Amino acid sequence: MMKLVQALALLVALVPVGPVAAQAPRAATPVAVPLPPAALRAPYEPQLLRLSEIIGALHYLRTLCEGPEGGAWRREMQALLDAEAAGGERRERLVQAFNRGYGGFEQTHRSCAPAARQATRRYVAEARRLVAEITSRYGN
């Protein structure tokens, strides 16, 4: 887990974060999916699901905006799956979260408009916060 979180932190650092405008982009709003108590196998499961959703959104947005990291977000998601969920229901939930993040922006953004760049900055900031939280609370 620790190596994965460190790798994600490095990848998040690749994306420049400029000032965020006051107006929110008109993008799909992420919807929190309630989990049954049995599904919470790790105490950081909700953060991991949100991070998966953000990685999916960033994969679409950075591809759309021709980011320098190319397919790195997809590779990071694969590394997350390999480290956290080799198979089964948990893996499926993480994949669904990734696809939800990707699909939400795929439906609303067809070009690298200012709203797409702003959404990227916001998601990078949120991913940084999540990675720091997971690392500080649950890292070895």
Image (cartoon, rainbow, N blue to C red):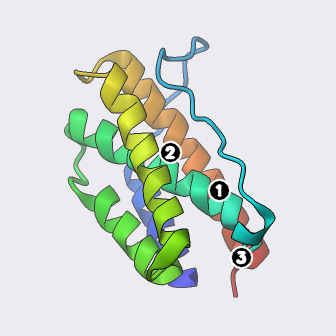
The answer to which quarter of the image holds residue 102 is top left
Left or right: residue 47 compared with residue 38: left
Q: Nearer the viewer, mark 2 or mark 3?
A: 3
Residue 57 in view: no
Where 112 falls versus 11 (above or below)? above
Lower sequence index among marks 3 and 1: 3
Left or right: residue 116 compared with residue 121: left
The quadrant of the image that shows the C terminus is bottom right
Q: Nearer the viewer, mark 3 or mark 1?
A: 3
Lower sequence index among marks 2 and 3: 3
Q: Specify the label residue 124 is tagged with.
A: 2
Residue 46: x and y in percent read 69, 58
Furthest residue to the bottom?
140
Left or right: residue 63 compared with residue 61: left
Q: Specify the label residue 130 is tagged with.
A: 1
- Crowding around mark 1 (Cα neighbors within 10 Å: few <14, some 14 to 19, many 20+) is some
Lower sequence index among marks 2 and 1: 2
* Tag 1: amino acid: Leu
How far apart in space, not on screen, are marks 2 and 3 (Cα)?
26 Å
Where 114 falls versus 61 (above or below)? above
Dot 1 lies on which element? helix
Residue 133: x and y in percent read 72, 62
* Tag 3: amino acid: Arg
Residue at 53% of width from left, 61% of height from top?
Answer: 93
Residue 115: x and y in percent read 41, 18
Dot 2 lies on which element? helix
The quadrant of the image that shows the N terminus is bottom right
